[in-house]
Image: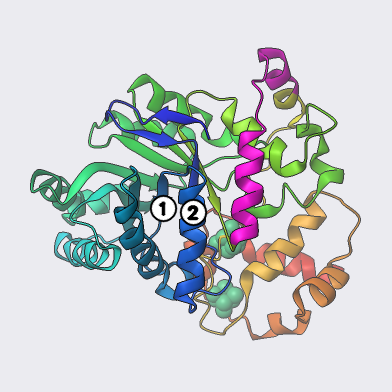
């Protein structure tokens, strides 16, 4: 395992972070916590979780693993989040997270999921940011950070306001132009950078025909190529890998450990192959899962990804055989707009539904 300094915090963390957002059976706390511990035993020291992840079980699972990790006497850090606007509500989230995670203080606490600069203004105006700073003074938070789906120039604006010591952002080999400026701004301010979605929500890894150009050596797997691209950037501190089970931990750690430094030319070769960027792909983050009509929006949007990357799979087949859903489900859509409001990638979901209806 490689370790990197997290900005100017004085903390060193593993370059692979454990992402606690994809446990395959979150109601099985024992088994899920064992997966977290497996990562810890393999040298991972950065653990990321949040309220509501995995049916709201993720913090409980990570907390269970932390109880055990404390006994082992090796260092680790834990990160959690709150997206509240009101300071008093953020405080409630924080206290709940501390309790569930079995820690006295959160090593990293994220002002979670800044979607727009207006949203950022609301977090300041509503007292959330002030409450994070207060909790830091009280010793309940060691390092204040933010997580975001903003484009690079907007990330830079938030960074320049000087509240935070690090940023968590979505970034991968095929959408890097969208947030590059944010990473550079973080480096200029000596801040830590945690990358979420380094595998493009899985799209990258499962579509070698479209994205095989990210492999710089024939023996690399797509998982290795996606993670190595991130590791080649020294401005990035941690690549968060969402692990469903022990097998995911093993393959991610093996991929990380097979890294050999890229030359500047090799990095440039990948970059020059990305035409524009692929930031218009759905990352299957499932933030849109609160559809009042119960429509599994992400299943349709992931299907649409396949028309964008032109891998030849028909939407009808994808919906039927991969997702087991019918295009008829879209007839329930009232066009309320909720899914578009919460979409982390700001995707034109309703427009894509129409395209799918025509194609399927
Ligand atoms: S616009 Fe349609 S799919 Fe989106 S949340 Fe509303 S009803 Fe659900
Ligand atoms: S449509 Fe948007 S919010 Fe929903 S899964 Fe895809 S990227 Fe995430």
Do labels 1 and 2 touch, CB within 8 Å? yes
Q: Quadrant of the C terminus?
A: bottom right
In this rendered view, identify the residue nearer to me: 19 or 209: 19
Which x, y percent locates residue 135?
13, 51
Task: Give the residues in magenta.
Answer: 246-269
**Number of residue marks:** 2
- In terms of secondary structure, where does tag 1 sit? strand
Q: Is residue 157 above or below residue 75?
A: above
Q: Looking at the image, which residue is at 59% across and 63% down? A: 245
Q: Is residue 117 left or right of residue 348?
A: left
Magenta highlight on residue 262: yes
Q: Which residue is under mark 1?
A: 48
User: Within the magenta stretch, is there residue 320?
Assistant: no
Q: Nearer the viewer, residue 357 or 5?
A: 5
Secondary structure of the residue carrying tag 2 is strand
Q: CA distance from mark 1 to mark 2?
A: 5 Å
**Where residue 121 sits in the image (x, y, percent)?**
26, 48
Q: Is residue 168 above or below residue 337?
A: above
Seen in the image, is 343 located left or right of residue 204?
Answer: left
Picture quarter with ligand 1: bottom right
> Could you classify mark 1 by the number of other residues whose Cα lies within 10 Å: few (under 14), some (14-19), or many (20 or more)?
many
Farthest residue, direction front: 72
- Most foreground residue, 168 or 298: 168
Does the magenta stretch mainly form a helix, a strand or a loop?
helix
Of all residues shown, which one is farthest toward the left? 138
Residue identifier under label 2: 19
Q: Which residue is at 67% across, 39% downward?
A: 226
Q: In the image, is 100 to the left or to the right of 272? A: left
Q: Tell me which label, 1 or 2, sits earlier in the chain.
A: 2
> Of 209 and 67, which appears nearest the observer?
67
């Amino acid at each position: 395992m490689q370790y990197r300094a997290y900005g100017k915090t004085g903390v060193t963390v593993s370059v692979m972070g454990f992402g606690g957002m994809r446990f395959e059976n979150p109601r099985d706390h024992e088994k899920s916590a064992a997966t977290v511990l497996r990562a810890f035993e393999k040298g991972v020291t950065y653990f990321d979780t949040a309220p509501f992840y995995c049916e709201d079980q993720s913090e409980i699972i990570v907390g269970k693993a932390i109880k055990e990790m404390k006994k082992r006497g090796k260092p680790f850090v834990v990160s959690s989040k709150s997206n509240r606007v009101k300071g008093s509500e953020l405080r409630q989230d924080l206290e709940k997270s501390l309790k569930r995670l079995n820690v006295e203080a959160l090593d990293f606490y994220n002002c979670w999921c800044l979607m727009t600069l207006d949203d950022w203004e609301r977090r300041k105006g509503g007292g959330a940011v002030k409450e994070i700073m207060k909790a830091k003074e009280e010793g309940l938070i060691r390092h204040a950070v933010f997580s975001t789906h903003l484009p690079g120039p907007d990330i830079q604006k938030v960074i320049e306001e000087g509240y935070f010591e690090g940023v968590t952002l979505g970034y991968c080999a095929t959408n890097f132009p969208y947030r590059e400026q944010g990473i550079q701004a973080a480096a200029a301010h000596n801040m830590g950078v945690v990358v979420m979605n380094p595998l493009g929500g899985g799209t990258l890894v499962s579509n070698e025909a479209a994205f095989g150009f990210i492999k710089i050596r024939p023996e690399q797997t797509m998982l290795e190529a996606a993670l190595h691209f991130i590791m080649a950037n020294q401005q990035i501190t941690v690549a968060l890998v969402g692990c469903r089970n022990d097998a995911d931990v093993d393959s991610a750690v093996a991929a990380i450990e097979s890294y050999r430094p890229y030359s500047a030319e090799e990095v440039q070769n990948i970059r020059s192959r990305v035409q524009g960027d692929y930031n218009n792909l759905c990352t299957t983050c499932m933030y849109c899962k609160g559809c009042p009509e119960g429509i599994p929006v992400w299943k349709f949007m992931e299907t649409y990804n396949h028309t964008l990357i032109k891998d030849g799979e028909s939407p009808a087949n994808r919906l039927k055989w991969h997702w087991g859903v019918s295009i008829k489900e879209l007839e329930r859509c009232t066009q309320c707009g909720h899914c578009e409001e919460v979409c982390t990638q700001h995707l034109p979901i309703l427009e894509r539904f129409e395209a799918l209806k025509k194609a399927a």
